[in-house]
Every structure is written in structure tokens, then in C-alpha cells.
Image: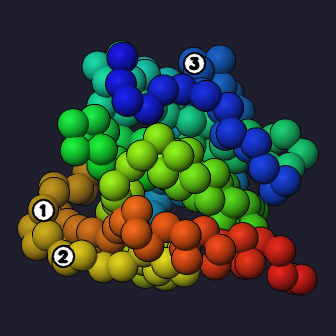
Amino acid sequence: MTWLTPLRLQGSHGSLEPLSIDHEQDLIAAVSDGELWNLWYTAIPAPRAMRAEIERRLDLQRKGSMVPFTTRDAAGRIVGMTTFMNIDAVNQRVEIGSTWTAASVQRSGFNTECKLLLLTHAFEKDAIAVEFRTNFFNQQSRRAIERLGAKLDGILRSHQRMPNGLLRDTCVYSITRAEWPAVQAHLQWQLDKPR
């Protein structure tokens, strides 16, 4: 098994639980909220591809390189997916990624809290760094990652081929263990301040 294992993480704005094939229909409803698969600069599964995506993530979990989660809002409604991925147990580094959230929950405290829960768990398990990656053109994702307190490590040019055949430049961000206490305080302050 891997250094990070499947578990339930609970907050006040939402929760994360281990991904299951039983979540398929609710995930189809969530991805349909905003037709997220139509965003050209990211790879979010269309409803017809949801089962294959769940199976892909669960297969990577069995191989030890991913811990996938289903996300739920405060009311318990399934609203998306996220993962610990590219798990490097030897160097104690992990990426938080392959994340998507229903449009109706975006730009709320939900994403901040989900990232706080994941980051807290990773650093409690002695991660030395947690990484985030996104498409250069995904400005919404880049701003969200920067609001977390992650720093841009660099841009991998022509890094990946997208489903539409275009080459993606990937922005790589990270938060290190030394930065974590300040980042954690900042994220908690963001969640606690009146909206």
C-alpha cells in the first residue's frame, strides 16, 4: 500500500471520502452542473465517460500512485472529485490534482476547505512538499492555487498532449513543509472571515 491511504476528511463546508464506483450517477449530475467537460483547457470527464474515469482512478489507487476522493458539499451532495496523485513515498512528495467541482459550488469556501483538509493530512503524514499543476491557460485554477499560498515553481512547456490534441504548458506550484504553518493559518483565516 502507499504512504497516503484512503480515508474520510470532514470539514464544515464539505467533506471528502474515498471514491467508489457507487458514486457514478451522482458524479454525472455534478459534472453536468456547468457542463464542465466542455472546458477546452482541462480534462474533465463527460457523463458518458464517468465510469471509465472512476475505474481509471481506482486502478491507479491499487497501483499506489493515487488516492482518489469524491467531494461532498455541506448538505452531503456529491459535487466533484479530487486526488492525491503522483505519490512519491520515498521523497514524501505528493500532488493534489485531477480536481473538478460543480459550477454551483465554485468560488465558495468549499474548495478552500477541501484543499486545507488535503494539505493538513499530507503534512501530518510528513510530506516535505505538496504540488499543484494546471494548464497555463486555466486562469481560474491558477488564481485558486495562488490564493491557497502555493508558489509557482515553473512552467513545463509542451508538457502534455490534451484530449483535443493541443500541447499543454503546465504551471507547477508547491507548498513546502517550512511554508505550511503560515499557509495553514492563512487558509483558516480565509474560512473564518465573514463573507
In this view, the mark in front (3 or 2): 2
Q: Residue furthest left?
A: 158
Name the quarter where the N terminus is drawn: top left
**Which residue is disc 2 drawn over?**
155
Could you tell me which residue is drawn at 26 percent across and 51 percent down? Answer: 163
Which one is earlier in the sequence, the residue at label 3 or at label 2? 3
Asked if one can make out residue 59 in the rendered structure from this viewpoint, the answer is: no
Which amino acid type is shown beneath numbered disc 1? His
**Which residue is disc 1 drawn over?**
159
The quarter of the picture where residue 90 lies is top left
Q: Element type at marker 1?
A: strand
In this rendering, is residue 162 above or below 154?
Answer: above
In this view, the mark in front (2 or 1): 2
Asked if one can make out residue 13 in the rendered structure from this viewpoint, the answer is: yes
Q: Nearer the viewer, residue 167 or 58?
A: 58
Residue 123 image point, x, y percent: 48, 51
Q: Residues within 10 Å of mark 3 (few under 14, many from 20)?
A: some
